[in-house]
Amino acid sequence: MSRDRTRGRRTERRERRLEARATGVPKTAQPVSRFQVYEVLNDEELEKIHQASMEILSSIGIDFYDEEALSILREHGADVRGETVFFDPGLVEEYVAKAPSQFTQLARNPDNNVIIGGKHLCFAPVYGPPFVIDLDRGRREARLVDFQDFIKLAYMNPYMHHSGGTIVEPTDRPVDTRHLDMVYSHIKYSDKAFMGSVMSAENAADSVRMAEIVFGAEEIREQPALISLINISSPRRLDDRMLGALKTYARARQATIITPFILSGAMAPVSVAGTLAQQNAEALAGIIFAQMCEAGTPVVYGSFQTNIDLQSGSPVFGSPESQLALLASAQLARRYNLPFRSGGMFSSSKIADAQAAYESVQVMLPTIMAPVNFVLHAAGWLEGGLTAGYEKFVLDCELLGMYHTFLKGIDLSEEGMAMESLRTVPPGSHHLGTPHTMRHFRTAFYRAELFDTRPFEQWQEEGAEDAYKRANGKFKALLKEYEPPQLDEAIDEELQEFVERRSKKLMIEH
Amino acid sequence: MSRDRTRGRRTERRERRLEARATGVPKTAQPVSRFQVYEVLNDEELEKIHQASMEILSSIGIDFYDEEALSILREHGADVRGETVFFDPGLVEEYVAKAPSQFTQLARNPDNNVIIGGKHLCFAPVYGPPFVIDLDRGRREARLVDFQDFIKLAYMNPYMHHSGGTIVEPTDRPVDTRHLDMVYSHIKYSDKAFMGSVMSAENAADSVRMAEIVFGAEEIREQPALISLINISSPRRLDDRMLGALKTYARARQATIITPFILSGAMAPVSVAGTLAQQNAEALAGIIFAQMCEAGTPVVYGSFQTNIDLQSGSPVFGSPESQLALLASAQLARRYNLPFRSGGMFSSSKIADAQAAYESVQVMLPTIMAPVNFVLHAAGWLEGGLTAGYEKFVLDCELLGMYHTFLKGIDLSEEGMAMESLRTVPPGSHHLGTPHTMRHFRTAFYRAELFDTRPFEQWQEEGAEDAYKRANGKFKALLKEYEPPQLDEAIDEELQEFVERRSKKLMIEH
């Protein structure tokens, strides 16, 4: 293909994407924290965790269950013995330094491009539940229609910056081709950035190809159009499926989030510090490997660290141990100058009750204060991640709105100080009708629609609904109002053809 | 009274108090934050708020509705014009500097003495609701038996450091003598520190007298046995009842919390910065006045700042504006080297639902991270403070336990690093039975009893209870188990005689 033809195509695609801006949904602006970071380790303590993980990397080793991966690691200077790989600190430093500290992920609507890194925060929906729940239909296996409903809810919410990935598992679709349905749905029903499939190298390649159709093959090598979740099988293992996906994405310069998934007491010791050391070694091993595949490919340092209940073995969310782990992990990511993923609105609760809300904010507020750059599971998570709740989703979104206001900080301009009002309103009087109040009446305070402030008697007369019930009305109203964003017909057709062709092939092969 | 007799009595009282230690309730240890403070203003911004409040104090003025107070202020160098008082910055600095930065409040059980200031946190129950609610009996007017029930719940909880004050209004008791019932109940049903009445100078004097009976008159001048809540009637007013109580407590060297009660948009401008400037001026005015009454008397800088919903006029809790206000107020208190009171488990919700929990943690976690020294309303608050919830109380207490663990930080000792386990557990295996896990099995993680982590099916089969329902069972079980702490019979008799005598007198007078 000649250079000119390429440029022509690229321009054309850019124009199509720019056209997509004209939608009725409010623009999603990422918050940027203007505050200091919140730290739970001093420099010496942070160094102690770092050193312990260097011991793990250099002397204890990490297993890679993929022949090609082992070759790549060997070629780039790692010490490979069988399937176990040892990294000396110099090698760690060298390859970690190749990763960018910040990058931009493309969205179909360029207004919704997201910056991952620095003090930017990006909120994405829950990821992975095989079940969904709502008050009308109860708990049930998730289907593609649920998957699409959650895309719509995320698309319509101005505080959700990202369309996410496997928001729920569309269990009514064949396992082998499900990834095609999911990626296509993200493109079709939203214009926000989305995630790729990580089930295998092949699925990852399909995700990349679909992103190329939408954004252009060269464009997505310059700035990634996919961000994908590579979980480490703790302790100290990267399995072949995840490595297959990781290689594919790294070589395509698509972003990956390298996350050891750790419940202290099961996959790691019952101590926060020991678990941090293990997590750090595992995350760095994945990040180094990605950089060996393709230097400079965007990677995110991921942490999913909580603990089990030692009496039942169940995972616990919102625990103080998980708060400490999150804040310390953010410090580790910053130490290596890497974008950071953690947090979310986690809960063990089966329904959107007080427990769900207590636990969710227990994790989410440290997430905001850390701050975390990429916040997966920012809405909808229930039952330890087994269920996505429709009501929980819209309730969590109320909090996301609050965090946008919080992160802006305090307005200390002359107008913000309001000295004229302070001078003129007499003692014992009120500010309800002052010129200052009238000027800011509509925008002064964030308003959480689902949080009731009516007097008790009025609340009782009007049905005494709890937050769960109010959220039920809200999500149904939103889904009724939904209108899809524009999608260029030629692109849509090309995508549909691709999905059809690949689906047929995959159904025959498997 | 001779010195020797005084010493004899004092020793005797100390001994009696020491005997009170032998109870079945776990010792309540205050958490001390080992983390940095979380700040939302830089130094320059903080100075801007300070300067604005200096303008209010020196040029706009604060009203004091009490003749004697105005005389005291005039005598100590304030510029008094009518009922409006102006303070120049030098005078502010001089008198604020007289207040101690930290003090210890005595508890009947000396193990439960609390430190107010520094990086210590002290949790106290909800204060003030005229209503109570629980799932069995619904919402109703609070009675003395409710008041006593909440004292018992606070007494039994190892994470609640304080017995509080007017936990609920005992509306079945006569208004004029209610304070006697409340103070007596705190002493009788708990051995934790408690608060005095602020309804009038007379009620304050009764509270002091009862504290003297328990602790000794000279003892409580050395270390306060009462801490009491003086609210400023914003904007810029101190009324006669509050000033009466403030004078009494200050002269008796009993601690007071000077708190402007402000809803932005009503008692202050619709901006956080303007409200902070007003709050700061008002709090400092009260603190200066207390120091003019009695130099060195313990005072706490209080902040109760949130906003109204501008559409309905109702107060809003858990708002991002209130989070910013809380964190900035903590910075102001630190600027003046004063202990700080703010925060609590606030909500507008009528019941212990998701809204109640979201809003509560939204305020409580910044409270922990600020940190706040005296946390009133740390459990039980519902409906904007109009109702105390039994279930809400025990649910909130679960979080208080979590905060104790959080504030301890990460154990980085050799045992905490768990390197031996990290070295020996092979990839893909687990840490469930390691020697390290076995050593820490019972204490490794904080366990929230009311937060369910069972699998969905089991939870459903066992009744599908939400957190609200589980909390209902919990508070009733606790009240059944309750056993009162020891109280010296002679002291109890003296208290009862005092209450009887004063009650008769007050009933005749009013």
Image: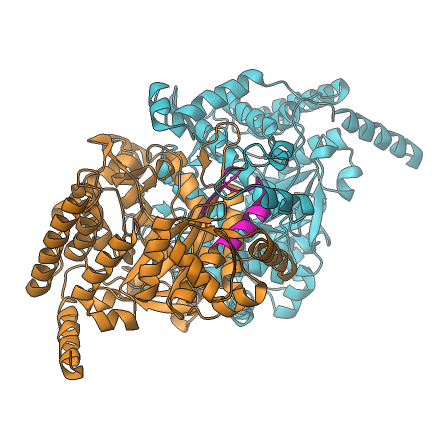
Chain colours: A cyan, B orange
Inspect the magenta stretch and tell me whether residue A375 lies in it.
no
Residue at the extreme top: A480
Q: Residue at x 19, y 70 (%)?
A: B216
User: Which region of the structure is painted magenta?
Assistant: B261-282
Residue in front for this viewpoint, A292 or B111: B111
Q: Is residue A335 visible?
A: yes
Q: Is residue B117 visible?
A: no
Residue in front for this viewpoint, B436 or B88: B88
Q: Is residue A251 left or right of residue B13?
A: right
Quarter-wise, where is residue A189 in the image?
A: top right
Inspect the magenta stretch and tell me whether residue B265 lies in it.
yes
Task: Point out residue B432 in the picture as x, y percentages from the top left corner.
Answer: 33, 56
Relative height, residue B302 to residue A177 (above, below): below
Point out the image quarter for the C terminus of chain B.
top left
Residue in front for this viewpoint, A469 or A106: A469
Point out the image quarter for the N terminus of chain B.
bottom left
Relative height, residue A473 to residue B174 (above, below): above
Residue in front for this viewpoint, A55 or A23: A23
Q: Is residue A170 left or right of residue A357?
A: right
Q: Is residue A484 left or right of residue B341?
A: right
Task: Point out residue A506 in the picture as x, y percentages from the top left corner.
Answer: 60, 27
Task: Point out residue A73 in the picture as x, y percentages from the top left corner.
Answer: 64, 59
Q: Residue at x 71, y 21 (%)?
A: A487
Task: Point out residue A470 in the picture as x, y percentages from the top left corner.
Answer: 42, 24
